[in-house]
């Protein structure tokens, strides 16, 4: 059973039901999708990204620095150790989010954030947001997803 189906099933008494082909279905709505999206978004972002969460945090910190910055400047802003900065800046440099502009043995390393990049790509792991979903669907009624509950509901007797 998919996550959206589970969420709709948990809220079955608050959801609309329809009968189709002599079976009763729960109609999942955009709220069910939104709940599933919030659960899955963080898990997928961390699983599918080549950038560790600490490196993402470091990239966000670097956004607020001068155009060119050093590890020492990052350390002052973040309170991270130089070893942590060295460790977590490496994936950002190798994946093209930060450029190493100068430095080497015995020299101060200088970096700059490469623009344009989208921090959203970390937060949106390739799944459509509920807001985008509603925009893609022309009418509100079409935004409802039919999901078979997996359970047969007793029809109310008149």
Image (spheres, rainbow, N blue to C red):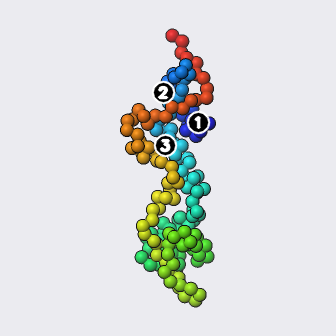
Q: Is residue 90 above or below residue 110?
A: above
* Residue at far left of view: 138
Spatial distance from mark 3 to mark 2, Cα to Cα? 17 Å
Spot occupied by residue 102 in the image (x, y as percentages of width and height)? 50, 83
Which of the numbered marks, if any, corresponds to residue 16? 2
View extreme (top): residue: 158
Residue 105, quarter of the rendered image: bottom right
Position of the N terminus by quadrant: top right
Task: Determine which residue is flagged by label 3.
Answer: 34
Identified at 50% across, 40% down, the residue is 33
Q: Determine whether the residue tagged by mark 2 lies in a helix, strand or loop.
A: loop
> CB under 8 Å between callouts 3 and 2?
no
Circle 1 residue: 6
Residue 113 in sight: yes
Classed neighbour count for the residue bearing mark 3: other residues with Cα under 10 Å, few (<14), some (14–19), many (≥20): some
Indicate the secondary structure of the residue bearing disc 1: helix
Above or below, comparing residue 97 to residue 48 in the picture: below
Give the structural element (helix, strand or loop) at label 3. helix
Q: Are marks 1 and 3 in contact (CB under 8 Å)?
A: no
| Residue in the picture at 53% in, 65% down | 57
The percent coordinates of residue 120 (x first, y second) are 46, 58
C-alpha distance separating marks 2 and 1: 15 Å
Q: Nearer the viewer, residue 78 or 102?
A: 102
Where in the figure is residue 124, as x and y percent of width and height? Answer: 50, 54
Look at 53% across and 50% down and name the residue there: 41
Task: State the CA–CA distance, disc 1 to disc 3.
Answer: 13 Å
| Number of numbered markers | 3
Give the residue at x 48% y 80%.
101
């Amino acid at each position: 059973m998919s996550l959206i189906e589970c969420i709709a099933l948990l809220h079955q008494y608050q959801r609309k039901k329809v009968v189709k082909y002599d079976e009763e279905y729960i109609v999942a709505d955009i709220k069910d999708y939104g709940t599933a999206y919030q659960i899955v978004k963080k898990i997928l972002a961390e699983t599918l990204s080549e950038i560790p969460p600490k490196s993402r945090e470091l990239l966000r910190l670097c956004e607020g620095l001068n155009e060119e910055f050093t590890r020492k400047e990052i350390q002052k802003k973040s309170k991270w150790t130089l070893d942590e900065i060295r460790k977590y800046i490496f994936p950002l440099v190798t994946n093209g989010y930060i450029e190493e502009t100068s430095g080497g043995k015995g020299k101060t390393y200088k970096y700059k954030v490469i623009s344009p990049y989208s921090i959203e790509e970390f937060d949106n792991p390739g799944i459509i947001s509920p807001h985008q979903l509603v925009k893609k669907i022309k009418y509100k009624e079409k935004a409802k997803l039919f999901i078979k509950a997996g359970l047969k509901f007793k029809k109310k007797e008149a």
